[in-house]
Structures are given as C-alpha cells and as structure tokens.
Amino acid sequence: MNIANYVDVAPYRSQLLSPAELDYFEKLPVLRRRMSYLMGRMAAKGALVQLIGDCDYRSISIEPGSFGQPVVRYGGQEPFEVSIAHDSGQAVAVAFEAGYPVGIDVETFNPTLYQTLIDAVPDSEKSWCDRTFDYYSQYSQYSQYPQRLLALWTLKEALSKVLRCGMTVPMELLSIADLQCIFPNHYRASFRHFSQYQARLWIADQTVLSVVFPRQTEINFDPFQKSWFSQNALHPMVDSFDLAG
C-alpha cells in the first residue's frame, strides 16, 4: 500500500508516467482532475514497485478497463492489479496479485455530502453512528455522527471496488454485518451478503480509509498505518457494535 501527495510528485510527472499516461495527463483541462490522476498513479505505482520490484515507474502503465477500473499493463502481461482512491489532496493505493481481490477507499467529510450519506446508510447501520462518547469532544470540534456515516460509506465503496460493481447497486447489497474495534481508530468489519470478505477501517478526525480483502487472509498494515496517520490528524475513537444483531 502506498500514499501520494500532489505537491511532492507534480514536478516529476515525466519520470512517473508512461507515455500513454503522460499524454492523457497533459490533455486533462481541470487542475483538480490532474491532481487526482497524478496522485493516484503515483500511489499505485509505488505500491506496485514494492510488489514486483521494478524501479522504473514509466514501464508500468495503468489504464482504464471497460468499467473504468484500473488495469495494470507491465511487460506485456497483466499479472498484477491495483485499487486506487483519492480525496482532498492525497491518494492511496494497494497493489495485489491477480486473483486476490482488494478494494480501497479514502474520503474526507464534506458537509455538502451529508444528506447523501443520510440517504445511503440504512437505519440498521445508523444506530452505530448514534452512539456518542463524552470524552471525544475534548479531542475534536467535529461531531462523530457525520464522520461515522462516512466510515460506513467508505466500507461500502471499497467492497464495490472488489465486486467491480461500483456504487450503482442497491445499498442493501453492500450491507455491513458487524464493526468491531481492534485498536483506537482501527476497526474490523464484515459484510452481510459477502461473508467471504473482511475489511479494515481507520478514522483520523475527518478522514476515513477502508480496505476490503478476502476473509481467510491477514495483511500486515503496520507500515502503512504509520505513514497514513502521520499525514492526518489522529484522535482516539474506541467502540464496538454488532450491526447484525
């Protein structure tokens, strides 16, 4: 897994992008779209290099598939896959071997999306968001409720990337079965209709990140956690709530 920041990587775009990617990048008319594209490619290639051991980022090309999903082109083969997410000036990505599906999503709370989150999250899951903690107010000026709605949304979006269905399917299909605290700010989740997958969720103030991967595996997230939390304000949240009950 890897993280990228636009300010850090923009001057080196010709050293990071393949010819096809660079041509696409230069034609993007909007700065915000350029930022998300470049950060996403940098994060994805950083993760891929850790997996395949190739140091020349330009030899890796990440192109859109038929459903818009990122497709890795490397050495005439496609043995690797990648999941990319970007929001509010940062991008995250996870690279994995083909046949081992992983999905990632990162979001920062935006008040304009509050009603969308309210409509998207079912009442059975909102009960987790309703739980409040007096001690939390001393760490942050923000309400937990919007943040927790966003956390549930990122879990669903990460799962939709694994399933390659996007967020166009009924939200009930992406229902969360349970959500349990592992450590402060770090949660484990499972899904009602896709029990073969599990998820990890991290909350850092107004930014939330989720990763979904096969249930019968374990991933060492420690190096990634240290890097991600160092770039986001960290405030403790400790809770465990069974959504399936």
Image (tube, rainbow, N blue to C red):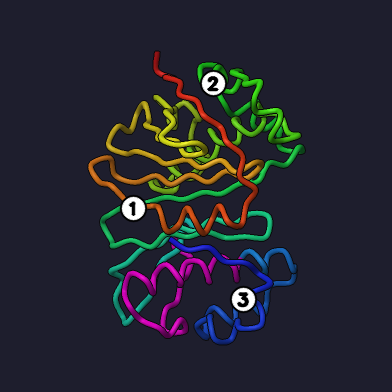
Amino acid tagged 1: Asn
Position above or below: 19 against 6: below
Amino acid tagged 2: Trp
Label 3 packing within 10 angstroms: few (<14), some (14-19), many (20+): some
Label 3: which residue?
A: 9
Residue 29 pos. (x, y %): 74, 71
Residue 139 pos. (x, y %): 69, 35
Residue 49 lies in the magenta-colored region: yes
Whether tag 3 and tag 1 are in contact, CB under 8 A, the answer is no
Amino acid tagged 3: Val
Q: Nearer the viewer, residue 86 or 68?
A: 86
Q: Nearer the viewer, residue 180 or 88?
A: 180
Mark 3–mark 1 Cα distance, whole angstroms, equals 26 Å
Position above or below: 245 against 209: above
The circle on residue 128 is 2
Principal SS element in the magenta part?
helix
Residue at x 67%, y 32% (from the top left corner):
116
The circle on residue 220 is 1
Residue 60 lies in the magenta-colored region: yes
Q: Nearer the viewer, residue 17 or 56?
A: 56
First in residue order: circle 2 vs circle 3: 3
First in residue order: circle 3 vs circle 1: 3
Q: What SS does tag 3 mark?
A: helix
Residue at x 48%, y 44% (from the top left corner):
210
